[in-house]
Amino acid sequence: MRIVVERSGPLAGTVEVPGAKNSVLKLMAATLLAEGEYRLTNVPDITDVPVMCELLGAMGVRCERPSPHELVIRNSGDVTPVAPFHLVDRIRASVNVLGPLLARLGRAQIGMPGGDDFGSRPIDLHVAGLSAMGAQFALGPEDVRAVAPRLRGAEILLRFPSVGATENLLTAAVLARGTTVIDNAAREPEIGDLCAMLASMGASIEGVGTDRLVVTGAEPGSLRAADHEVVADRVQAATYVAAVATCGGDVEVRGARPEHMEMLLNRFAEMGVAIEPTGGGLRASCGQRLRSIDFATLPYPGIATDYKPLLVGMLAVADGTGIATENLYPGRFRYVDELAKMGADVRIDGHHAVVRGVERLCGAEVSAPDIRAGAALVVAGLAAEGRTSIDQVHHIDRGYDDLVGRLRAIGASVSREPTDR
Ligand code: EPU
């Protein structure tokens, strides 16, 4: 499949924001902690969800999809703590089964996690934190094996506020003996969402939303299944705002949580996008050429690395020169070559991208290197003269719930086509 985009705008109407990939996959992993039936709602219809279902299924936990945006997960207690490499290798979030398996079953064997290819993505912080809680690890080239008869509470100071490490330590700590303190914890809204579901399951977590999480472990078997509504996806929401920014218009992004995107929305406003919170989301409008800004990616509440390709695409057509600095993944600039095919003037210097705005991009045949960069190429295509064709769409489908349908609904000229046409 490929996505074909024609110059569009102004955009108008309403777009509904789906649930967050980077929350739902972690909530699914957390169902390993307690027996029973879970019902997750506002589940995004993205391809990473069935992969996670398959992974849970391989361990004995059954997932059903009564509707595209709902998941029923049944943990009968008969769980095999082995996550096969061929599944783990497909999504990074599969590493999140480590904490729950160790906490609930005292052992885990998982293939080395995969996900997007934009540089080395180690799990040393996960391993160090779980080791401090008493787990013993054997790290092989293809898998990680760990045992821990009963995890114990520990004081853990993360060298870096890693999202995945914070989540794994949280889901381990909820069943550990005693109290665990996670300092310099990641504060992303998806972690708050995980804490909310863990609390509904009976876990005791203080400091939610801060960089110091204090978890009082429950007795094994004392947590229970819960129902939960997945938090709205701030990156998908940002994508629709970026689309309005790039080709003009006035759109309500319903379900967006402006309080989860504050820093980004401030920067959008500096670039000339009018943002207004509404009761149930936000309204974005733009009627002029964007102004360039400099920005740097940082852990939450900073500008997320996942927003960066969108912002670089906006800078590509903005008035002036902007510098984008990547502080999380040094290799996450590969899509810049694709933007250059569309006429963008971007120079990479170490972990900086210097973007000189051009009046107009031109349509080209480009390829999506990963989820976020792929979506950014689609958005850039909306501002390009002529036809832009984006292939490797399967990357976009991992994290975007009907990007094409949603953009079409607000007036964009975009469609999916089989690649052999
Ligand atoms: N890091 C370490 N050691 C670790 C863990 C992380 O050095 O043990 C480093 C990483 O190498 C990286 C940085 O810390 O340089 C950030 O990693 P983090 O652990 O915070 O990220 P993650 O949990 O692997 C999640 C999202 C990513 C998102 C990042 C940062 C999921 C499944 N993935 O990854 O999302 O970019 O947080 O916000 O939640 C995406 O959705 O497209 C995506 C890549």
Image: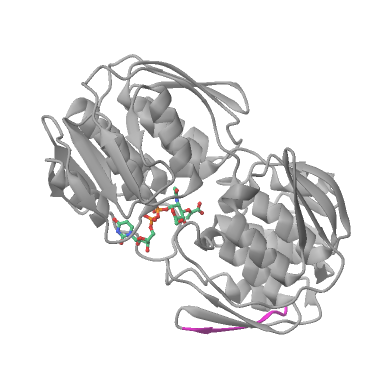
Tell whether position 369 is magenta.
no
The tally of labels here is 0
* Residue 278 rendering spot, x and y as whole percentages: 76, 44
For ligand 1, give the image quadrant: bottom left
Q: How is the image coloured?
A: one colour
Give the residue drawn at x 75%, y 65%.
381
Q: Quadrant of residue 340?
A: bottom right
Q: Which residue is nearer to you in this view: 417 or 17?
A: 17
Q: Which residue is nearer to you in this view: 412 or 132?
A: 132
Give the residue drawn at x 25%, y 36%.
173
Is the magenta region chiefly helix, strand or loop? strand
Is residue 154 toward the left or the right of residue 159 in the image?
A: left
Is residue 192 toward the left or the right of residue 294 in the image?
A: left
- Residue 20 in sight from this viewpoint: yes
Is residue 147 toward the left or the right of residue 103 in the image?
A: left
* Residue 162 rendering spot, x and y as whole percentages: 35, 55
Q: Which residue is nearer to you in this view: 119 or 359?
A: 359
- The stretch of residues the image draws in magenta is 343-349
- Quadrant in which the C terminus appears: bottom right
Q: Which residue is nearer to you in this view: 260 or 102?
A: 260
Is residue 86 toward the left or the right of residue 343 in the image?
A: left
Give the residue drawn at x 70%, y 70%.
270
As drawn, 346 above or below 1:
below
* Residue 24 rendering spot, x and y as whole percentages: 49, 36
- Residue 84 in sight from this viewpoint: no
* Residue 355 rendering spot, x and y as whole percentages: 64, 81
As drawn, 298 above or below 173:
below
As drawn, 389 above or below 200:
below
As drawn, 349 above or below 83:
below
